[in-house]
Amino acid sequence: MPRYLGILLVLIGLAARAVEQPLDDAVKVTATSAGHAWHYAAEDVTLDGKTYLSYAYLKDDQGERARGWISFDVTGWGRFTATVGVSDAWKNHRGALVIEVDGEQKHEITKRSGEKPHDVELSLAGAKTLTVRFEPSILLAAPTMIRAEQVNPKDGAAMVWVPAGEFVMGSTDADKDAGSAEQPQRRVYLDGYWIYKYEVTVAQYRAFCAATMRALPNFPLGRSWAGKRGWADPALQGHPIVNVTWHDATAYAAWAGAHLPTEAQWEKAARGADGRIYPWGNAWDGAKCANSSNSSSKDISTWPAGSFPAGVSWCGAHDMAGNVWEWCADWYQSEYYQTAPARNPAGPAMGDCRVLRGGSWDNGEKYCRGADRNNYIPDYWYGSVGFRCLSFSPGP
Ligand SMILES: [Ca+2]
């Protein structure tokens, strides 16, 4: 039986701080949730001969898929402290709570799972209505995960399986470092695919050039390449290839019987179904990828592919954050998400630049986010730019 992991729990504990005056018995409490059919139920409690509201439940029509509740301390009405949090038990989910008293918005609080609860002051003295609007950003059941792996026989590259289904693409205003090009956040459905477990390596790219009589990219200078004897140097074979244009990357993919990922395919492989910010979760950790803090600032550039196993993504793809930027198939358009299709988006029909994703050894947390969108003209190349491929060969 598939187990829904996407259970969002938002708990507001309203704890009485001081008794001022009793809230009118007729106070009307309403609770709604955008996009979901939520049921509201109240349970009355009598205290000293007077009836107060004790609990209000918010529960959606899919039972255990999502649930929240509001509890009131019945020892008095007046000024309250509301504690808002999303349970740690349900990873990578988020909810926004809007609290209105007599039609006036008092608080809007957005919390992700794992974040510390947040206390707000709320006065209900003399109030007639309390409205709590619960807006789960996007609730998704995590896909049944089959960690599957196979090798592309053409270039020997390991590939990991990304199952068909929806994921959360893009960012909201509430996300730190989010740019407007990442908005609006939306659900996107993708067919299943295999994505390369690692960025394409120097050894793989050399084999492609040898087989197709193609010139190797310019050899970069300095940093991890210093003292090396060109692309054939044994110490570089497991590093990602760099200095490749979008055309180089596309030609490699065609030779390998593969494709470049669309940016949607790239982002799903990096973030999973649930909109996590980094491949490993929602909190930045510079020790989990090749980034400026452990690389360029120490005169290091690329690392051998897969050097940061703690930063592996949900589907088993390595270096989705950092090491090298990765060319994607799509043309770049900053407003694309506003009109993009919800199924298998393939990018705008035309443009000037192609999308790059994931940040590099020369970037920090902002650009290593799975939702970040970079772009360059397709002829651009640099020592921080590489790629990985994708295959539609049959799934596991
Ligand atoms: Ca990368």
Image (cartoon, helix red, strand yellow):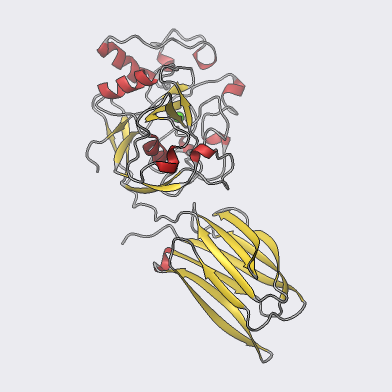
- Residue 207: image quadrant is top left
> Looking at the picture, how far across and down is residue 113, in whole percent?
54, 54
Q: Is residue 84 visible?
A: yes
In the image, is 159 to the left or to the right of 231? left
In the image, is 31 to the left or to the right of 157? right
> Looking at the picture, how far across and down is residue 209, in whole percent?
31, 13
Q: Is residue 27 above or below residue 137?
A: below
Quadrant location, the N terminus: bottom left
Residue sitting at the far left: 394
Point 60% across, 66% down: residue: 12
- Marks counted in the figure total 0
In the image, is 204 to the left or to the right of 22? left
Q: Is residue 313 visible?
A: no
Point 59% across, 60% down: residue: 85
Camera-side residue: 152 or 359? 359
- Quadrant position of ligand 1: top left
Q: Is residue 149 above or below residue 219?
A: below
Camera-side residue: 83 or 239? 83
> Looking at the picture, how far across and down is residue 170, in whole percent?
47, 43
Camera-side residue: 148 or 119? 119
Quadrant location, the C terminus: top left
> Looking at the picture, how far across and down is residue 390, in whole percent?
31, 32
In the image, is 288 to the left or to the right of 350? right
- Residue 313: image quadrant is top left
